[in-house]
């Protein structure tokens, strides 16, 4: 008992007080900024392992980007990755960052379904489905629940049963072998419900795009409510994304 | 000679691998392993050559650092005698060969597909219709769990046969995570694409798999990585081990409902993964390791940060462990739970922690050293009870050991080589094999190139490929309520297995 208390005392306060504004350590690769400098665009496009870069105008699709940073390394004056981790949005097009633009990537409250704010604004229970995820996004979703990031304080939690859930969180490129379990699980969640995609693999297929072992047809059937990019998505990106989706007021 | 002998990370012409008759091939490879705990199969696979299937078997000899490679040409219509009948450690390899090419085996006990691969031979089989082992009895019941589990983890299906609370049998069906990694290695031609693929084999073993891939590619291209490159890899491998072991200790505490241990170990993992972000910009080390280049040289400032970080980490880690390992309620859950005997791990051929827990010393860091491990003279931590306690103890001690290794590594940070990335071209008609001890155990990557140096085969073997069966054996005769803690104490990879 006393030993336990001693340990608690030694740990001190671990939680991050302000998850919306805390700075991340080191060389975080978050939202990219693309300058208007002229570069060999063909080379730049060719460099990307996942075809996330388009030319004329040069743009990076964060839904495809693996955040490997090779483009910023080779073209440092053209592309820079900032430490802005708030890059989740409800509109797929907003994940595409164009040259010369330095706008924030945010949830657009005008296009969020009306019931999300009303029903899930105070509490959100999610069922996570890993559908070919490599266990990195899964680790980060777990980390979002640890004592430091402590997503539970906002009433956002993962639950075991889809019957108890308000929506599903998909990680991974959705393998053929997980397509049916995914559908069954989604069907078991009561209405109204949301779909959240976490990580590049889930949003676009990532490096696995085009593999014959995938079956992404589930995503053609239902609208996605939130895209949380990253490879893997950072816990702060996840927390801020979910909060923005459920609590951001209309303008 | 009916086999050839290579070292870890050695490239040889495919033609140098002797091709023998199947009977001789079987006698040779089962003869290597039967009754010789120091020799084990690190990879055994097939690939199409013309109208035939070429089988290549690689047996590592831990006492001599050698790897014995032999081959055999068979047809997909053949029905062969199985290696498995003689030595069980070949069981899953033969299932995989059967799945991919339709080769039949007369005396294999359970020819179930491994991962329902999209390159399976028999397209009528899908993940939904495969039979499970069953026992007919009015006294028994079956419990089916998954593929989607209660927590935030990867999918897999577990089918228990129980007598009351007691587990008699567990069958683990995986394959849900199958993304076709090996096929994509052949299709994706850019080096960066392949590095990204290697990173996504198992997102918790990024350093392990990218190191194996990098060594393989460098060997194939005749590139000699400089000391600073190997320094970064060695350090990162030990770092990944520390981070994952600490996370696992947290998970084990969660499963025995010890909230304090769960929280403290969980939070102790954070500074470890955050350091990776400081170093390479990614908490799980994606982008850190690439062939022929030191992507993120470890600066003296970062080395100093490691020193500070350990100073804060160590007392908390030690204190929490002291408390955990003297708690009767924790020990009663750990001790004699989920036991796998030495004979069993030897028979099924487990690797890494799942071997060392039961007195079987398998550790590539000492048996087939690479990177800076020849200098470290690694001394593997071996336990003997094969229970949850042994597995948890290995983690506790390996964290301390890795910390010692890293501390001694950063005393002498090598000069950074200011050179351009070394790019070579892969040797044609070659075979190469690379072994790395990831935090779970032995990782093996193999490749074969064609006359233009393009991959005709890329084979990935995660340690979990061997070790899942150990979990199935561990839970026998345990209460089903002890399954979670058994599972967590192994913490095997789904994606690494399913590819």
Image (spheres, helix red, strand yellow):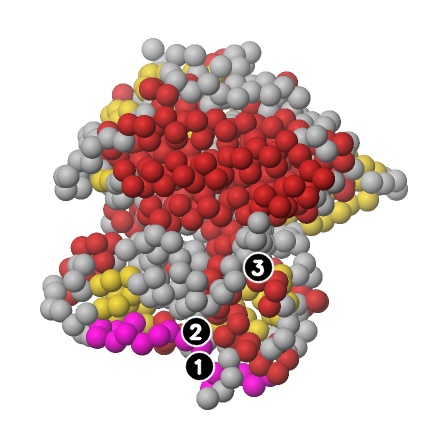
Q: Which element carries disc 3, helix, strand or loop?
A: loop
- Count of residue discs: 3
Q: Which element carries disc 2, helix, strand or loop?
A: loop
Pick the front one: B299 or B488: B299
Return the residue at label 3.
A150
Are discs 3 and 2 both within one chain?
yes
Observer-side mark, 1 or 3, equals 3
Question: What secondary structure characterizes most of the magenta part?
Answer: loop
Return the residue at label 2.
A89
In 3D space, how far apart are the residues under numbered discs 2 and 1 (Cα atoms)? 7 Å
Q: Residue at x 26, y 68 (%)?
A: A33
Pick the front one: B445 or B228: B228
In 3D space, how far apart are the residues under numbered discs 3 and 2 (Cα atoms)? 21 Å
Q: Sequence-wise, which precedes: disc 3 or disc 2?
A: 2
Pick the front one: B215 or B285: B285
Q: Which residues are magenta?
A: A97-115
Q: Which x, y percent locates residue B173?
A: 61, 44
Is A39 magenta? The answer is: no
Asked if marks 2 and 1 touch (Cβ < 8 Å), the reply is yes
Q: Farthest residue toward the right?
A: B138
Return the residue at label 1.
A108
Are discs 2 and 1 both within one chain?
yes
Pick the quarter of the image with the N terminus of chain A: top right
Q: Which element carries disc 1, helix, strand or loop?
A: loop
Image mark 1: chain = A
């Amino acid at each position: 008992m006393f030993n336990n208390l001693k340990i608690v005392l030694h740990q001190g306060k671990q939680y991050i007080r302000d998850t919306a504004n805390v700075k991340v350590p080191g060389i975080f690769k978050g939202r990219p900024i693309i300058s208007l400098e002229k570069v060999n665009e063909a080379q730049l496009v060719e460099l990307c392992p996942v075809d996330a870069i388009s030319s004329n105008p040069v743009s990076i699709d964060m839904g495809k980007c693996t955040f490997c940073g090779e483009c910023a390394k080779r073209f440092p004056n053209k592309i820079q990755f900032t430490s802005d981790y708030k890059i989740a949005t409800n509109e797929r097009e907003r994940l595409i960052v164009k040259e010369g633009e330095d706008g924030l990537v945010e949830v657009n409250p005008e296009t969020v379904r009306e019931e999300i704010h009303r029903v899930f604004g105070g509490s959100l229970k999610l069922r996570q489905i890993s559908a070919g995820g490599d266990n990195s996004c899964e680790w980060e979703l777990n980390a979002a629940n640890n004592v430091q990031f402590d997503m539970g304080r906002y009433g956002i939690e993962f639950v075991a049963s889809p019957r108890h859930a308000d929506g599903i969180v998909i990680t991974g490129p959705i393998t053929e072998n997980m397509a049916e379990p995914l559908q069954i699980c989604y069907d078991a969640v009561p209405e109204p419900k949301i779909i959240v995609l976490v990580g590049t693999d889930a949003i676009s297929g990532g490096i696995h795009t085009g593999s014959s072992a995938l079956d992404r047809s589930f995503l053609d059937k239902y609208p996605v409510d939130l895209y949380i990019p990253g490879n893997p998505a950072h816990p702060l990106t996840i927390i801020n994304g979910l909060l923005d989706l459920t609590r951001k007021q209309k303008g | 000679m009916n086999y050839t002998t290579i070292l870890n990370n050695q490239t040889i012409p495919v033609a140098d691998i002797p091709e023998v008759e199947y009977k001789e091939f079987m006698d040779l490879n089962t003869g290597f392993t039967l009754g010789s705990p120091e020799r084990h199969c690190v990879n055994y696979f097939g690939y199409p050559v013309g109208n035939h299937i070429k089988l290549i078997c690689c047996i590592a000899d831990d006492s001599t650092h050698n790897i014995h490679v032999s081959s055999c040409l068979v047809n997909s219509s053949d029905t062969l005698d199985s290696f498995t009948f003689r030595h069980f450690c070949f069981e899953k390899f033969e299932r995989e060969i059967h799945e991919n090419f339709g080769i039949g085996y007369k005396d294999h006990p359970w020819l179930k597909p491994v991962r329902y691969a999209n390159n399976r031979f028999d397209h009528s089989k899908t993940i939904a219709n495969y039979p499970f082992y069953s026992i007919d009895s009015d006294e028994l019941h079956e419990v089916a769990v998954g593929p989607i589990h209660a927590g935030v983890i990867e999918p897999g299906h577990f089918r228990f046969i129980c007598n009351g609370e007691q587990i008699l049998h567990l069958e683990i069906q995986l394959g849900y995570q199958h993304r076709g990694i090996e096929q994509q290695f052949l299709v994706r031609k850019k080096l960066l694409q392949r590095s990204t693929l290697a990173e996504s084999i198992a997102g918790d073993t990024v350093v392990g798999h990218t190191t194996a891939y990098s060594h393989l590619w460098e060997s194939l291209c005749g590139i000699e990585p400089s000391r600073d490159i190997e320094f970064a890899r060695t350090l990162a491998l030990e770092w990944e081990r520390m981070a994952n072991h600490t996370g696992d200790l947290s998970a084990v505490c969660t499963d025995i409902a010890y909230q304090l241990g769960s929280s403290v170990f969980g939070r102790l993992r954070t500074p470890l993964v955050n350091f990776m972000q400081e170093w390479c910009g990614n908490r799980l080390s994606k982008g850190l390791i690439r062939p022929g280049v030191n992507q993120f040289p470890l600066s003296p400032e970062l080395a100093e940060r490691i020193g500070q970080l350990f100073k804060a980490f160590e007392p908390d880690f030690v204190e929490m462990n002291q408390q955990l390992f003297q708690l009767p309620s924790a020990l009663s859950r750990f001790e004699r739970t989920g036991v796998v005997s030495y004979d069993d791990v030897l028979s099924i051929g487990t690797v890494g922690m799942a071997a060392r827990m039961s007195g079987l010393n398998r550790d590539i860091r000492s048996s087939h050293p690479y990177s800076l491990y020849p200098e470290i003279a690694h001394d593997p931590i071996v336990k003997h009870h094969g229970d949850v306690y042994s597995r948890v103890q290995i983690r506790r001690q390996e964290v301390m050991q890795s910390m010692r290794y890293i501390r001694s590594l950063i005393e002498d940070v090598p000069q950074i080589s200011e050179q351009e990335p070394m790019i070579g071209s892969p040797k044609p008609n070659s075979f190469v094999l690379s072994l790395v001890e990831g935090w779970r155990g032995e990782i093996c990557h193999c490749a074969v190139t064609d006359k233009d140096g393009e991959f005709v085969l890329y084979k990935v073997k995660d340690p979990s490929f061997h070790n899942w069966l150990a979990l199935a054996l561990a839970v026998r005769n345990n209460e089903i309520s002890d399954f979670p803690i058994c599972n967590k104490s192994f913490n095997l990879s789904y994606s690494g297995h399913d590819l």
